[in-house]
Amino acid sequence: MTAGKQTTIRERIELKGAGVHSNAPARLVLHPADVNSGIVFLRTGLADGRERLIEAKWSKVSLTELCTVIGDQSDASVSTVEHLLAAFSGLGVDNVVVEVDGPEVPIMDGSAAEFVEAIDHVGLVQQSAARRYIKVLKPVRVEHGRAFSELRPHASGFRLEVEIDFASDLIGRQARIVDLEPGVFRKDISRARTFGFISDVERLWKAGFALGASLENTVALDGERILNPEGLRFADEFVRHKTLDAIGDLALAGAPILGCYRSFCGGHKMNVAVLAALFADKSNYKIVESIPQRASVSREVGMAAVAAFAPDHN
C-alpha cells in the first residue's frame, strides 16, 4: 500500500463481547468511512432509542481512571476505547465509524489482538486523500510526582519509549522502545493483555470497576504469583501493555503523530494530559502530509524483572 494515503476498512466488521469494567454486553460494528472522517463512535442503545456521535479526540475525554472514556457521562459515553484505538493506530487505519450499543468497548481477550485479526481479515482500502500527520516541533511534558509523559521532536515516524516501575517483583522495572508500524505492532504489542492485582479487586468492585474481569481477559497477579494457567505471553507483557494503552490514548490526537513519546510510570490520565499540553500552543506542532521512511525498531531496554485496568501510576 502506497505510504501517505488515508485508509479505511474494506468491509463492515462485527464483534461482540462484554466490558471489563461494566460487564455489560456490547455489539461492536466497524463501518468503512469517507476520507477526512477520522475515527468516530456512534453510541446506540441509549434511552428512548437515541443515538449520539462522539469523535475520538482528546478534547472529548471525560474520564481516565483505569480506562479512557469519551463522551459525556450524563448523556452518552463509551468506555475503554484505548485497545480498539491502538489497533487502528498500529495498523494505520484513518477513517472508521465505530457503532457500539453498550457503554463500553468489549474487552475481548484484554489486548488488541482480536481487533487486529478482524481488521486484517477484511483488509484495508487506500483512499484518494493524503494522510495528514501531526509533527511535534517543540518538547511538551506533564508530570505527576515522579511520573511523567512527554512528546518531543523525532527524526522520523512515531517512536514510543515507555518505562514502568512496580513494587511487585513479578513486574519490577521494565522499559520498551517501539517505532510504530504495522508489522511491529502486530508482532510485539497487539497481544499484550491488561493486568491487575487480586488485592485490589474488592476496592475496584465497590467503585464499579473490573466487574467483567476474568482470567480470560486479564493477567491476574496474586502476591508474587500469576494466576493465569497459561502464564505470560511475553516476559515483559506488562510494559508492552502500557505501550499498547499509550498508542491507543495518543490516537486521540486525531491524526498520526510524528515525534517521540516518552513516559515513566504514566497512564491514561497523563497520556491525555500530554496531548492537551501539545495542542495548547500552536507553535508546538504543525500539520504535514509527508513522512520520512525509516527502519522499524522494537526492543526491551534495561528490563529489571522477568517474569487496563493496570494502575494508572506505579
Image (spheres, rainbow, N blue to C red):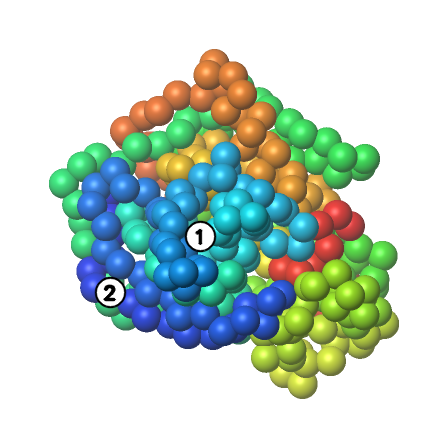
Between disc 2 and disc 1, the foreground one is 2
Q: Residue at x 61, y 46 (%)?
A: 63
Neighbours of disc 1 within 10 Å: few (<14), some (14-19), many (20+): many
**Residue depicted at 25% across the width and 38% down the height:** 36
Q: Which label number is shown at residue 12? A: 2
Check if mark 2's residue and mark 1's residue have beta carbons within 8 Å.
no
Furthest residue in direction bottom, as rendered: 229
- Viewer-side residue, 24 vs 128: 24
Query: What residue is shown with label 1?
Result: 85
Q: Residue furthest front?
A: 48
x and y percentages locating residue 60 in the rendered image? 49, 39
**Residue 66 seen in the figure:** yes
Q: Nearer the viewer, residue 269 or 150?
A: 269
Element at label 2: loop
Instruction: Count up the numbered dots.
Output: 2
Q: Give residue 81's position: percent from left, percent from top.
A: 50, 55
Q: Which mark is residue 10?
A: none
Residue 66 falls in which quadrant of the image? bottom right
Q: Amino acid at mark 1?
A: Leu
Q: CA distance from mark 2 to mark 1?
A: 17 Å
Identify residue type, mark 2. Answer: Arg
